[in-house]
Image (spheres, rainbow, N blue to C red):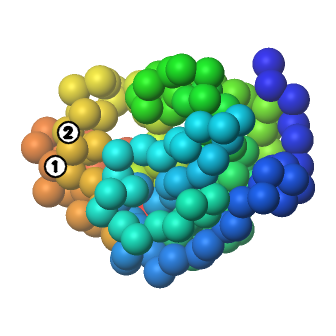
Amino acid sequence: MEEKLDPRKELERLGYDLVYKPHEDVADHMAFYKVKYKGKEIAPPIVEKYNISLNEIWMSEKLRPYEKFILHHELQEIKYRAEGYGVKEAHKKASEDEKVWRGEPKYEKLRREINLVSEEFFTELTGFGETLYKRIVKNRPYFDIEEVKEVEGIGPKRFQRLKKNFWTL
């Protein structure tokens, strides 16, 4: 299991800048980066859509209260990318490393944000399977939990259960 480092200190040690952006501008990915790490330039494909400078991590301003969790994830993902993992594999491994935060109330709340919820956590909830998860992900981002009603397979009862378990920034 990954140890809990202070993500802000690690960010500064690496010489990266954290840039908060209006939520509407980055809602489709919430946080992403373009950095040099161990001599390699690392960035997910989404950065081509944005004018992000080298050694910046961009994050939705609405994620500010959850900064340490998001930064931890992004820094872990960068590390895995530098080790040769692809974008999806690195994201998955970084998500697994988030287990160090389990039990912290703010982290537990963040895990339930519908735009960020992992498939593993989503499918742990009774009645919510992989197919529904994929439909929800396909239609992201959501700016209001009510928008989830539009996803195929979500009727009034299922929506009430979703609304009870998830929220939007």
Q: Of all residues shown, which one is farthest toward the left?
A: 152
Q: Position of residue 33 (x, y in %)?
A: 54, 54
Residue occupied by mark 2: 135
Say if 19 sits above or below 73 in the image: below
| Dot 1 alpha-carbon crowd within 10 angstroms: few under 14, some 14 to 19, many 20 or more | some
| Dot 2 alpha-carbon crowd within 10 angstroms: few under 14, some 14 to 19, many 20 or more | some
Q: Helix or strand or loop: what does disc 1 sit on?
A: loop
Residue 169 placement, left or right of 75: left
What is the count of numbered marks?
Answer: 2
Location of the N terminus (image quadrant): top right
Q: What is the quadrant of residue 108 in the picture?
A: top right
- In this orientation, which residue lies closer to the viewer: 79 or 127? 79
Q: Pointers 1 and 2 in contact (CB under 8 A)?
A: yes
Residue 121 placement, left or right of 157: right
Residue for point 47% across, 80% down: 22
Q: Position of residue 29 (x, y in %)?
A: 40, 56
Say if 62 sits above or below 89 in the image: below
Q: Which mark is residue 105?
A: none
Residue occupied by mark 1: 151
Residue for point 80% across, 45% down: 104
Q: Of all residues shown, which one is farthest toward the front?
A: 39
Residue for point 63% across, 59% down: 55
- In this orientation, which residue lies closer to the viewer: 26 or 151? 26
Three-letter code, disc 2: Arg
Q: Is residue 150 visible?
A: yes
Q: Helix or strand or loop: what does disc 2 sit on?
A: helix
Q: Position of residue 148 (x, y in %)?
A: 25, 56
Q: Position of residue 72 (x, y in %)?
A: 72, 45
